[in-house]
Image (tube, rainbow, N blue to C red):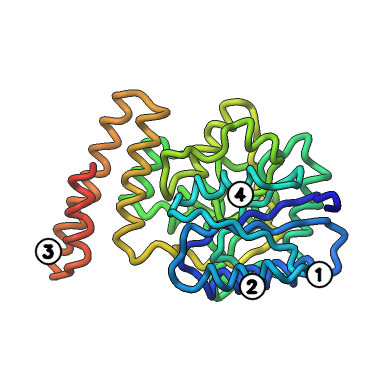
């Protein structure tokens, strides 16, 4: 097989049409590109026809597609780790299945990385919503003030915690929907933590990277639509996973005192949302945050 420069790793789970649209956008973006690339799709035992579709697409040699079937749901982090392990390129682009690559955004991102990799170790594109409005693509690490602002002060809405830069800049972490880095560095750091099933994987990875002196940047000229939570199965599951992710992250990286503070913030958020749900008769809020309260 010819030398591969870039391996694009995509994890799918019951997102047949969305994954197909993503793969088609990757092909369009890299049509006639000088980049020698491969696309690796890791399917987490989907039951919606994804397996048959991906098998058929992989048989078409013009797709540069490798299809890997896990036969079990490994989750997002372990699925990516599995894909990266099989990658033949020196560089890997971790791309969510619920993304649409615009114009030549992969080429822009990759070319910029190659020219700046002495200082840039992890690089992300600017994410957009379906209507092309900016989506928070970068964020600050989750110190207690950041968690408090995020959960209780609408920090994401006001750009205090997550934001969407308009110019190239260094940030604490970028969305796992689009992360470009050297394969060797990803593996040196151990990849995504295998004990995180979904949500908080990229925060943990880039926090570990930062502690070792590796930097993360965002490059807005490269733009990608991110639909968001396509394989989460409703609103309750991602909220509970975020709660579990916060707790896991603090147990792993912060002190007992900080963990205690996190518990208080999570319980306060859950209690407020639960009682708002009671007052409004909103079953979703009461059920979701009732569970969140006990998780925290």
Instruction: Report the side of 268 relative to 8 (left or right).
Output: left
Q: CA distance from mark 4 to mark 2?
A: 19 Å
Give the residue displayed 35% in from the left and 23% down from the top: 255
Which of label 2 and label 1 is nearer to you?
2
| 169, 37: nearer the viewer | 37
Q: CA distance from mark 3 to mark 2?
A: 50 Å
Q: State the residue position of label 1.
A: 31
Q: State the residue position of label 2.
A: 56
Instruction: Report the side of 213 relative to 158 (left or right).
Output: right
| Disc 4 and disc 1 in contact, CB within 8 angstroms | no
Going from the N terminus, do you reach mark 3 or mark 2 first? 2
Going from the N terminus, do you reach mark 2 or mark 1 first? 1
Which of label 3 and label 4 is nearer to you?
4
| 190, 277: nearer the viewer | 190
Q: Is residue 169 among what the camera can see?
A: no
Going from the N terminus, do you reach mark 4 or mark 2 first? 2
Q: State the residue position of label 3.
A: 278
Q: Secondary structure at mark 2?
A: helix
Q: Secondary structure at mark 3?
A: helix
Q: State the residue position of label 4.
A: 83
């Amino acid at each position: 097989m010819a030398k591969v420069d870039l391996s694009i790793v995509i994890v799918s789970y019951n997102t047949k049409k969305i994954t197909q649209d993503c793969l088609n956008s990757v092909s369009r973006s890299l049509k006639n590109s000088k980049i020698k690339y491969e696309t690796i799709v890791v399917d987490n035992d989907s039951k919606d026809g994804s397996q048959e579709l991906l098998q058929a697409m992989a048989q078409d040699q013009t797709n540069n597609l490798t299809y890997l079937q896990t036969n079990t749901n490994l989750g997002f982090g372990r699925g990516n780790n599995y894909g990266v392990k099989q990658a033949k390129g020196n560089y890997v682009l971790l791309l969510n299945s619920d993304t649409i690559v615009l114009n030549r955004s992969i080429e822009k991102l990759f070319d910029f990385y190659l020219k700046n990799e002495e200082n840039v170790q992890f690089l992300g594109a600017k994410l957009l919503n379906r209507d092309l409005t900016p989506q928070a693509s970068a964020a600050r690490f989750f110190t207690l003030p950041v968690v408090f602002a995020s959960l209780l002060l609408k920090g994401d809405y006001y750009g205090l915690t997550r934001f969407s830069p308009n110019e190239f800049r260094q940030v604490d972490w970028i969305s796992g929907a689009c992360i470009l880095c050297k394969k060797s560095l990803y593996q040196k750091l151990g990849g995504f933590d295998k004990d995180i099933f979904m949500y908080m994987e990229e925060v943990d990875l880039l926090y570990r990277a930062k502690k070792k002196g590796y930097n993360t940047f965002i490059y807005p000229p490269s733009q990608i639509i991110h639909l968001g939570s396509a394989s989460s199965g409703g609103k309750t599951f991602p909220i509970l996973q975020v709660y579990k992710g916060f707790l896991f992250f603090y147990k792993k990286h912060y002190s007992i005192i900080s963990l205690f503070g996190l518990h208080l913030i999570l319980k306060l958020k859950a209690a407020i949302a639960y009682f708002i749900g009671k007052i409004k008769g909103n079953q979703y809020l009461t059920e979701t945050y009732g569970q969140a309260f006990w998780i925290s």
